[in-house]
Image: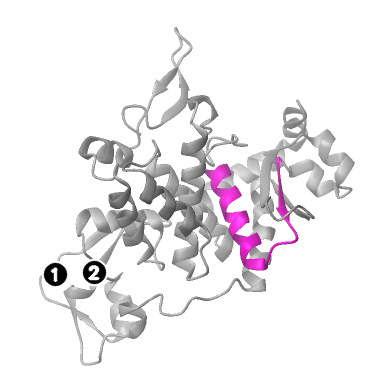
Amino acid sequence: MSGQLYQSSLFDSQEQKPKKYVPELDKLYAEVGSFRKSKDYMELLNFIKKFPKIAPYNAMLVRIQRPGSKFVASASEWEELYNRKINPGAMPLVILQRFGPVGFVFELGDTYGPNPIPKEILDPFGVVGEVSEKMYHTTIENMKNDRIIYREAKYGTGRAGQISSVSVKKLTRKYKNTEYRSKARYEMVVNSQHTPTTRFATMLHELGHLYCGHIGTPNSKWWKDRRRFNLSLETREFEAESVCWLICERLGIENPSAEYLDGYINENGEIPNVSVDTILKATGSIESLIKGNAMPHRNKVEKEVLKGMNKIIVEIDD
């Protein structure tokens, strides 16, 4: 977004108005303006999708440091997995690292070795796969950690699904499981008449809305609440579709969001006022659910929530 891409939930003590805050990544692209055009934006997403083995945000860092990169890995990964060594004097690329401040990776052109370059590096999306049952159920199970209940309902073919915030009272009427009642904050409903791949894509889209802050947050330490920013429907849908598109492309599965984004590119010269920073962080959060990765930034909050669960229930109910 230009000028007012993102605002924090901090308030000025005198005027009681939200202070303006623009993440550095959004600020960079707002000032340069290179991603405002639809074509440039899709080139950005297409670059990020080429690096499914690293987090989306790290893929963006690679793009900023070295545009045109084809594949990156750490020095140890190059040697152990691909039998390739790093060229003397090669400059590493800096990425963020879990449990540590930063890590270092090297691009394909910075390496050498006796064996041909593996096909998975040159063509990581040679085969389009399908959503596995394990992937589907792992995602649903891990959504519970973020207070999301999942269920399916018989809708007409024109309705895919929805996600909404719910109160404990409403959940009590639907679910007898006390674990759901005590922890749930959101309910996702997906059309049971659709194929597994379409249902999974619907899940990604609705999670995109949640993690982009379109319907609030249980805790600002998890993701930002952007409801107060008066985002347009077009912006919210474009952000959610972008998240879905990126994840599907990085997983190498059928991508229903491609048609939406392509259609927008054909009809408009510029994209809506979206936050690239938010889209990439939301994509990374959802990929963690899919892969079953631990989310350290939420574990501490989870313990605090469990300690004061009775208080949390009352706040949710209100």
**Which range of residues does the magenta coloring cover?**
185-211
Circle 2: residue type = Phe
Residue at 64% from the left image edge and 47% from the top image edge: 146
User: Residue furthest toward the top?
Assistant: 14
As drawn, the label of residue 264 is none
Q: Where is residue 251 in the image (x, y as percent from the top left)?
A: 49, 68
From where the camera sits, is residue 308 visible? yes
Q: Position of residue 168 (x, y in %)?
A: 80, 36
Identify the image quadrant of residue 191: bottom right
Circle 2: element type: strand
Question: Toward the viewer: 174 or 95?
Answer: 174
Circle 1: residue type = Ala
As drawn, the label of residue 106 is 2
Left/right placement of residue 200 relative to residue 10 reads right
Q: Mark 1 points at which residue?
A: 90
Residue at 14% from the left image edge and 77% from the top image edge: 87
Q: How far apart are marks 1 and 2 (CA)?
A: 8 Å
User: Residue furthest toward the left?
Assistant: 89
Left/right placement of residue 238 relative to residue 44 reads right
Question: Toward the viewer: 315 or 216?
Answer: 216
Q: Position of residue 306 (x, y in %)?
A: 71, 42
User: Residue furthest toward the bottom?
Assistant: 114
Q: Magenta includes 150?
A: no
Q: Are marks 1 and 2 in contact (CB under 8 Å)?
A: yes
From where the camera sits, is residue 101 visible? no
Name above or below for residue 143 compared with residue 164: below
Residue at 28% from the left image edge and 45% from the top image edge: 35
Answer few, some or many: residues within 10 Å of disc 2's Cα (few below 14, many 20 plus, some between 14 and 19): many
Looking at the rendered image, the quarter that the C terminus falls into is top right
